[in-house]
């Protein structure tokens, strides 16, 4: 004989509230605010699913597997593509899967139905190929089979940005700018979780060459921009990522800022990591050839030849040639050549064969960039000297810190004008001085600027 207990209500001893209550055909478990829990190891049937799955966080899938009804899986395809086999379909069965490492776009996950069953009405495999994709499949019936009822992306992740110290730090919108006007260290303590953001923008300008009679060449100018992450207005010499891109790591990067060359001396090199800009070539003495360098020095008066820029060669180029001293008359009374700039070669010194008609060449212009947040022109060449009885002014300095030339007068007791120094931290070449170049000026020091996304 089967024993039975027949009750309509079961109440708690403590406050006489219902634990189980029957009203008509409805049975209520618990009172408002109570929680209903199954004992450890117990299972439930007959309540149906709520359209959710139990995510299997303790079993990340890295190879082909067969899914079970009611479960969700994290698939790690970073090591290669594989397949998720769906279980035999029954109405209401549900399976979900998510891109664990956001690599479905590289290594696809294949979703394969059981036997001749269908996915979205087609008896064939499906492919998940979108970065961070998550999909939920519910089996409806034999006509349509498994239908994807929810598709999202889990590509929203926590992230970090570059964090660094060194130099003078300013900001330009979402970008930090580190400017080094003297040697130092760009010390990176953290990099971005987005690989493309670890290619930084940079500008490396060397010290300008010193003038003599010819103008000093500008220091080499090299610039990189991490486009399309960063689209500041750069110079015509910019190298956009990935060409000549500079990718950093969490480590220190020593910075060298080149000094300007003294009279008749080449400027010094500036460096940041693998980027090196060469100092500007020296301006030449009487009838001599200007020095080679980032930009070439100007030829000495009365027939001197120009120095070569972009030496050693870089791409894009780091500077231009200096100017020659060229006469159109029967003798060689001509002004000295201007020093080359980053944006243009130095102008030739000219003359018609008589001293009053000498004219020193202007220094080549520099180039403008807004890497610091505002447009600044740097790396202009120094002007070449004029010599004659009428105190004719020497060649002008090129835009971007190039120094203007002085002049020498005849006789030697007449006034002489000194050349102007290249502007500090522009890499400008020094202006030439009067004969014998004793009043020539030094080149300007260089600068290194680094720019990156920080928020």
Image (cartoon, rainbow, N blue to C red):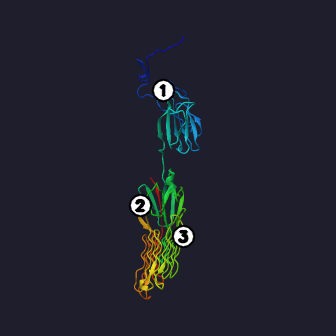
Closer to viewer: mark 3 or mark 2: 3
Is 26 above or below relative to 166? above
**Above or below for 276 versus 440:** above
Q: Earlier in the sequence, mark 1 or mark 2?
A: 1
For the residue pair 407 and 344, the one nearer the viewer reads as 344
Check if mark 3's residue and mark 2's residue have beta carbons within 8 Å.
no
Residue 390 located left or right of residue 316: left
> Is residue 385 in sight in this rendering?
no
Residue linked to disc 2 = 373
Between disc 3 and disc 1, whose residue precedes? 1
User: Picture coordinates of residue 419 (x, y %)?
Assistant: 44, 78
Of 434 and 361, nearer the camera is: 361
Label 3's element? loop
Cα distance in 3D space between marks 3 and 2: 29 Å
Residue neighbourhood size for the residue with mark 1, other residues' Cα within 10 Å, grouped as few (<14), some (14–19), many (≥20): few
Q: CA distance from mark 3 to mark 1?
A: 78 Å
236 with respect to 78 (left or right): left
Q: x, y percentage for residue 177? A: 45, 60
User: The N terminus lies in which quarter of the figure?
Assistant: top right
Residue matched to label 1 = 48
**Label 3: how many residues lie within 10 Å, few (<14), some (14-19) or many (20+)?**
many
């Amino acid at each position: 004989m089967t024993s039975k207990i027949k009750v309509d209500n079961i109440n708690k001893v403590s406050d006489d509230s219902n634990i189980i209550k029957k009203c008509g055909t409805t049975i209520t478990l618990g009172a408002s605010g109570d929680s209903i829990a199954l004992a450890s190891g117990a299972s439930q049937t007959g309540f149906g699913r709520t359209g959710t799955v139990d995510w299997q966080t303790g079993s990340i899938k890295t190879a082909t597997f067969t899914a079970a009804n009611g479960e969700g899986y994290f698939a790690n395809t970073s090591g290669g593509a594989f397949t998720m086999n769906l279980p035999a379909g029954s109405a209401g069965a549900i399976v979900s899967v998510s891109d664990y490492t956001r690599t479905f776009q590289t290594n696809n996950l294949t979703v394969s139905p059981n036997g001749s069953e269908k996915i979205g009405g087609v008896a064939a495999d499906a492919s998940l190929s979108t970065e961070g994709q998550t999909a939920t499949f519910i089996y409806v019936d034999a006509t349509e089979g498994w239908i994807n009822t929810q598709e999202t992306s889990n590509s929203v992740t926590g992230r970090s940005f570059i964090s660094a110290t060194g130099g003078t730090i300013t900001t330009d919108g979402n970008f930090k700018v580190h400017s080094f006007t003297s040697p130092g260290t760009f010390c990176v303590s953290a990099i971005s979780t987005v690989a493309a953001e670890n290619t930084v923008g940079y500008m490396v300008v060397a010290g300008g060459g010193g003038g003599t009679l010819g103008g000093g060449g500008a220091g080499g100018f090299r610039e990189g921009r991490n486009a399309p992450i960063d689209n500041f207005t750069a110079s015509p010499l910019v190298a956009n990522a990935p060409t000549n891109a500079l990718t950093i790591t969490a480590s220190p990067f020593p910075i060298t800022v080149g000094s300007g060359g003294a009279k008749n001396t080449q400027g010094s090199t500036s460096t940041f990591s693998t980027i090196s800009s060469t100092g500007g070539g020296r301006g030449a003495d009487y009838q001599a050839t200007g020095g080679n360098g980032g930009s070439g020095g100007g030829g000495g008066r009365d027939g001197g030849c120009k120095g070569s820029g972009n030496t050693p060669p870089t791409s894009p180029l780091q500077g231009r040639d200096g100017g020659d001293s060229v006469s159109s008359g029967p003798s060689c009374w001509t002004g000295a050549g201007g020093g080359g700039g980053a944006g243009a070669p130095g102008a030739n010194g000219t003359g018609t064969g008589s001293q009053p008609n000498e004219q020193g060449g202007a220094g080549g212009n520099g180039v403008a960039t807004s890497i610091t947040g505002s447009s600044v022109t740097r790396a202009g060449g120094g002007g070449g000297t004029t010599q004659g009885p009428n105190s004719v002014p020497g060649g002008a300095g090129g835009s971007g810190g190039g120094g203007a030339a002085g002049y020498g007068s005849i006789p030697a007791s007449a006034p002489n004008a000194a050349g102007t120094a290249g502007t500090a931290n522009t890499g400008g070449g020094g202006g030439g001085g009067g004969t014998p170049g004793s009043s020539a000026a030094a080149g300007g020091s260089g600068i290194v600027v680094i720019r990156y996304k920080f928020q």
